[in-house]
Amino acid sequence: MMEINERKSEEKDTSSSPEKSYFSIDEMRAEKGDKKKEGVNDLREGIDDKAGKIESIDDIRRSSENSALRKWEKANPEIAEIARLNTSSEQIKKMEWTQPEKWRTLDETQKRVALDRIGEVLMRSYDHPKPSLFVEENKDKKAIGSYGDGYKSDSSGNLIGADYGIELNREGELKRAHEKIFGKDPKLALGAYAHEFRHSYQYEQASRYEKPQFASLVDNPEKAREWSENIKTYNEAPPKELLDKDPDEYRKRFDKYANQPVEKDANNFADELIKRIYG
Ligand SMILES: [Zn+2]
């Protein structure tokens, strides 16, 4: 059993953090001086012709001749990540409900189903199991969502059950937008969902990284190692009561929470996806 499994990571609204600094994929690309290979088509140029006529990353992965792509992905993990983001957002963009005028007409159940569809797209692009989505009620409006990594243990460390899934708070509000995540703006719900989905991907990648027999299924070993270490030393978000009692301490702990690798990566992932879908 892994050590990373016993708790849920509570999410708070990180948009208010003054120190929220993204290392965006654009910046990363600029730094690497590689702005060309962005789309699936470009990606295809990077692999040999044996892969045949391929429409998407999904096709490549499902095909029996996927070793060329897999090799290429492993040799270029950062560009492969951009290709996955592009593939996912192209597909999500085509879904009618992602338009604000359509989203507004959906009730909560329909919104949950719509978000679940996003999970299916991400699942295929990221070759990663889709976590179940639960909508729950938490009076703390700052609590947007949480991710359960799949295992619950008793005090002796014995496995007693699994709750692998994403929970989003129907009362959750993003300060930046002054709006509930299940309100009028699909970007908020989509962003919150994408953030939590990314955590599930991080956990999965970290867990594959830790098991030698699954090492070949790690997309980016450097990232997976960083996430694996961070998950073991995860800084929880401070309880909201601390904000009144000791604002300085609250801020200090909040920054520690928001600036750790898995949180920065999840925020960055959600931002990159939203940027591609809504421009
Ligand atoms: Zn998070």
Image: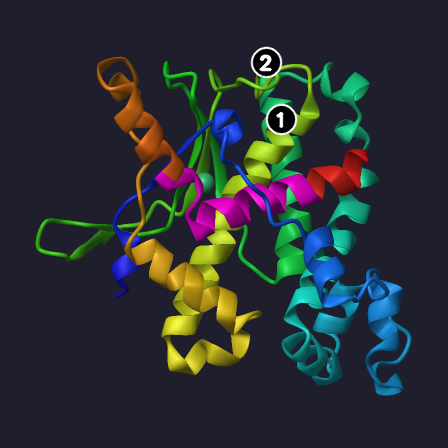
Residue position marked by numbered label 2 in the rendering? 179
Residue indicated by mark 1: 188
Type of the residue with mark 2: Glu
Q: What residue type is labelled 1?
A: Leu
Of residues 254 and 44, the one drawn nearer to the viewer in this rendering: 254
> Mark 2 vs mark 1: which is more N-terminal?
2
Q: Report, in whole angstroms, how far the alpha carbon at label 2 lies from the one at label 1.
A: 8 Å
Q: In the rendered image, which quarter is residue 45 located in?
A: bottom right
Q: In this view, does 239 lie above or below 105?
A: below
**Residue at 78% in and 68% down:** 59
Mark 2: few/some/many CA within 10 Å (<14, 14-19, 20+): some
Q: Count the marks.
A: 2
Q: Tell whether circle 1 marks a residue whose Cβ is less than 8 angstroms from ligand 1.
A: no
- Cβ(mark 2) to ligand 1 < 8 Å? no
Q: In screen coordinates, is 173 left or right of 81?
A: left
Q: Residue at x 64, y 48 (%)?
A: 120
- 26 lies left or right of 136: right
- The spot of residue 246 in percent (x, y) is 24, 19
Q: Which residue is drawn at 73% across and 51% down?
A: 88
Residue 84 lies in magenta, yes or no?
Answer: no
- Res. 53 image quadrant: bottom right
Indicate the quadrant where residue 80 lies.
Answer: bottom right
